[in-house]
Image (cartoon, rainbow, N blue to C red):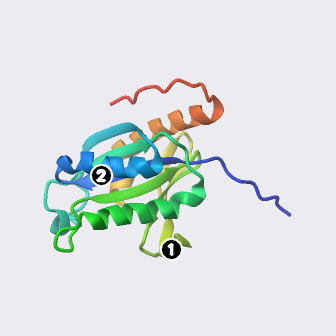
Amino acid sequence: MSTPVVPEFARLVLSVLCPDENILPVIKPLLERELGPVEEEIGPLEFPFTSYYDREMGPGIRRWLWVFEHLLDRSRLAPVKCLTNRIEQTYTIDGKRTFNLDPGFMTLGNFVLATGKNNAHRIYLKDGIFADLTLIYRSGSYHPLEWTYPDYADNGLISILNQLREQYKCRLTEPACARAPLRA
């Protein structure tokens, strides 16, 4: 019989997709009030992977990654997604989102996104939210799976996530570990 063990807390990495960066200073404090301070901001990053969001948000969409300082219990992934959904809804115009917030939990073994869309590989959490196993870590790097979205399978983004993982690993193993800046 296995003995249940609570896993280490995860690192919250939030992807922000939007064409207008002027909204960022508006939404960031809303997230920080609930989730704690953003420790690191990465971006803007080009987002040439899909035109899926263009009808809703318009062209010129770019990505920012906000990495939060506080590690979170993994059971909080669904509540974090519910929070981001509420914030997105608050800023819709004529029923269309002006930005997209995608929270993900980074662990030493994987990167998991939260989504409201079910699929064969997604595990239901609660409140209409599913966990999407997006990347797995093996042989020194995160790796995409057959269902991984193209933007998360991109080598540039994986390189950033690998660096963030090293910082996270350092924090887990050496609490006094100094945070090294990301290499561009």
Give the amino acid at mark 1.
Asp
Judged left or right of residue 63, residue 123 is right
Image location (x, y in percent) of residue 91: 24, 63
In the structure shown, which secondary structural element does the residue marked by tag 2 occupy? helix
Query: Dividing the picture into quarters, in which one does residue 89 lie?
Result: bottom left
Q: Which residue is mark 2?
A: 27
Q: Quadrant of the N terminus?
A: bottom right
Above or below, 51 against 13 in this view is: below
- The residue sitting at 54% across, 39% down in the picture is 140
Q: Can residue 84 be seen?
A: yes
In this view, the residue in front, 168 or 22, is 22
Image location (x, y in percent) of residue 177: 57, 25
Image location (x, y in percent) of residue 182: 39, 30
- The residue sitting at 40% across, 39% down in the picture is 160
Question: Mark 2 and mark 1: span between their CA atoms?
Answer: 23 Å
Q: Residues within 10 Å of mark 2 (few under 14, many from 20)?
A: some
Q: Which residue is mark 1?
A: 127
Give the amino acid at mark 2.
Ile
Q: Quadrant of the C terminus?
A: top left
Image location (x, y in percent) of residue 148: 42, 61
